[in-house]
Image (tube, rainbow, N blue to C red):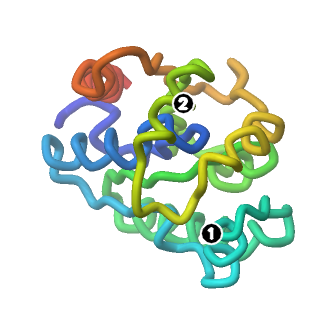
Amino acid sequence: MSGAGGHCVFIVMGVSGSGKSTVAEAMNEELHWPYQEGDALHPPSNVQKMHHGIPLTDADRAPWLASVRDWIDARVAAGEPGLITCSALKRVYRTGLVGGRSNVRLLYLKADVAVLEERLSQRTGHFMPASLLESQLKTLEEPRDDERPIVVPVEGERAKTVRDALAAVRQA
């Protein structure tokens, strides 16, 4: 990719059920960029809490966010593009991850509550139960214009969301 997006690390963000993993994996198949599933970086204690329906605190999230930031930093240091999934619910989290760098961007998958609830009701085998959606929505501070987010509406077919995300990244 020759555009600016080819040298960016994109944080694919949103609440549970927005399609972060699905979209990022499909984008990775198309772009062949380094990719990291952010949930895989959670410490086991966080996974246990979420599995039991216990919302994470900022203290719980700190080591996870440090691991996400380390992955981003490694891509930036190597001059590589990348895709990483991370809910990045609060502005303070995103500020730490982006770090004021123009080559680290947010790709916000914005979904209606009804879409999220439907998707989560159909999901199996994930440690994040649907019961934590309300907690995530309460915690979510949507990215503001000064954060330069790329906002992709999540509606209808996932294939359309992927196409819209790819088009947005290619124009970044």
- Rendered image: mark on residue 51: 1
Determine the residue located farthest toward the bottom in the rendered image: 44
Amino acid found under the numbered disc labelled 2? Leu
- Residue positioned 22% across, 25% down in the render: 159
Q: Amino acid at mark 1?
A: His
Q: Read off the residue under disc 2.
A: 116
User: Does the CB distance between marks 1 and 2 fall below 8 Å?
Assistant: no
- Residue nearest the observer in this picture, 34 or 5: 34
Spot occupied by residue 90 in the image (x, y as percentages of width and height):
77, 43
Q: How many marks?
A: 2
Give the quarter of the figure containing the C terminus.
Answer: top left
**24 in relation to 44, above or below:** above
Q: Earlier in the sequence, mark 1 or mark 2?
A: 1
In the image, residue 67 above or below residue 31: below
Image point (49%, 29%), residue name: 118
At mark 1, the secondary structure is: helix
Residue 167 is situated, as x and y percent measured from the top left of the image, at 27, 20
- Residue 106 position, x and y percent, is 54, 36
Label 1 CA crowd tier, 10 Å (few <14, some 14–19, many 20+): some
Cα–Cα span, label 1 and label 2: 18 Å
